[in-house]
Image: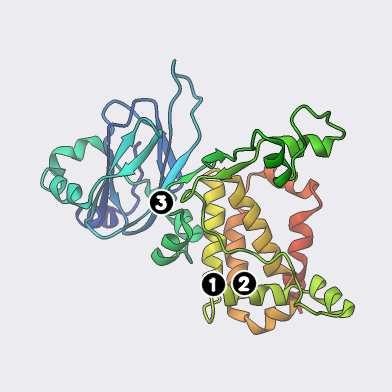
Amino acid sequence: MAARWPDPELARQLFFEGAAVVVLDVPEGTEFGIDYSAWAVGPRFRGVKMVPPGLHFVHCSAGRAGGGRDTGPRSGRFLSLRRREVRVLRWDPAGEAVRPEPPGEGEALRESLRELDSFLGPYPYETLKKWVSLTSFISEAAAEQLQPESGEICAFAEVLLEPAGRHTRDRAGQHRPPLGAECQSYAEGLARLPRMRPRAGTQIRFTELPRQLYPDGATPEEITRHSMDLSYALERVMEQRYPGRPLELLGELQFAFICFLIGNVYDAFEHWKRLLNILCRSEDAIGKYQDLYINLISVLYHQLNEIPADFFVDIVSQDNFLTSTLQVPTEAVSL
């Protein structure tokens, strides 16, 4: 977990002014990471020191019995750290995740931080610039509003089985076929699968994007226009969550990208695609929200540099999503 510090003065400043994330009881072999870096935990690991103040994403994946490189699903949480703050997390073996300890634990450990120093790895400075470029619009308030109520972001959502009902009248009320009835089609087979719902408090609280892209009572001509230019849908998104604060929408776009890229949350990728589609297909809005779109180009530049080449090929092969989506803002900028 050695970090390269090309700037000795910055290293010295963070040694005295940086935050520390103390992580207790993490089993050896667990993959632990902060922001854009991750490592396999050794027997002496107790956390990370010299962490620059600001927003960070701490994540981990449980090691598997018998060793090897395989790890369990990733889970993580955003932390907003102050200068010289000591944040304490503890491994929860039941949930295979790190959970925050009461705030008083950090103050108590501050007194013994020097004794812990040799057990703390330095923050990976070499990835700091990349992390800052990918989170430049995510404020502490935005992270607080978007993260699940539990504070934990999991690669696989925790779901509960919806009871199907044992009696015919119960199943009829749920529009399900009677038990024992022969399946007539593939679609019916899918409909018979158990219904699952996310456990309350575990879902990322993204803005609900409109399914209807045009106003009620729209004429056929207006429906066609609003389906081609999504400026009306974009305005609805703005009014719903970011009235008068259009740049904060870029924070949500970045939050979704981080949750997918580092947190391995596929639903976050789907939200990123849908939100990007609305932004890039809102031609009339480009003139109204010039600052938003100028900054969107910068945000996308840094994000697309992080998408692996083979993953980009997969996206292109599926309906040319990026090629068609980015066409409108690219043409507008070139005019």
Image quarter (top left, top right, bottom left or bottom right) of the N terminus: top left
| Residue that label 2 marks | 237
Q: Earlier in the sequence, mark 3 or mark 1?
A: 3
Q: Residues within 10 Å of mark 1 (few under 14, many from 20)?
A: some
- CA distance for labels 3 and 1: 20 Å
User: What residue do we see at 76% from left, 77% from top?
Assistant: 216
Image marks 2 and 1: residues in contact by CB distance under 8 Å: yes
Q: Secondary structure at mark 3?
A: loop
Q: Residue furthest bottom?
A: 288
Residue at label 1? Answer: 241
Q: Which one is nearer the viewer's eye here, 197 or 230?
A: 197
Residue displayed at 48% across by 66% down:
137
Which residue bears the numbered disc 3? 151
Is residue 306 at least partly visible in the picture? Answer: no
Q: Position of residue 192 (x, y in %)?
A: 74, 36
Which label is found at residue 254?
A: none
Label 2 environment density (alpha carbons within 10 Å; few <14, some 14–19, many ≥20): many
| Amino acid carrying mark 2 in the image | Val
Which quadrant of the figure has residue 45?
top left
Q: Position of residue 84 (x, y in %)?
A: 21, 56
Q: Position of residue 270 (x, y in %)?
A: 65, 52
- Would residue 335 appear left or right of 26 to someone viewing this image? right
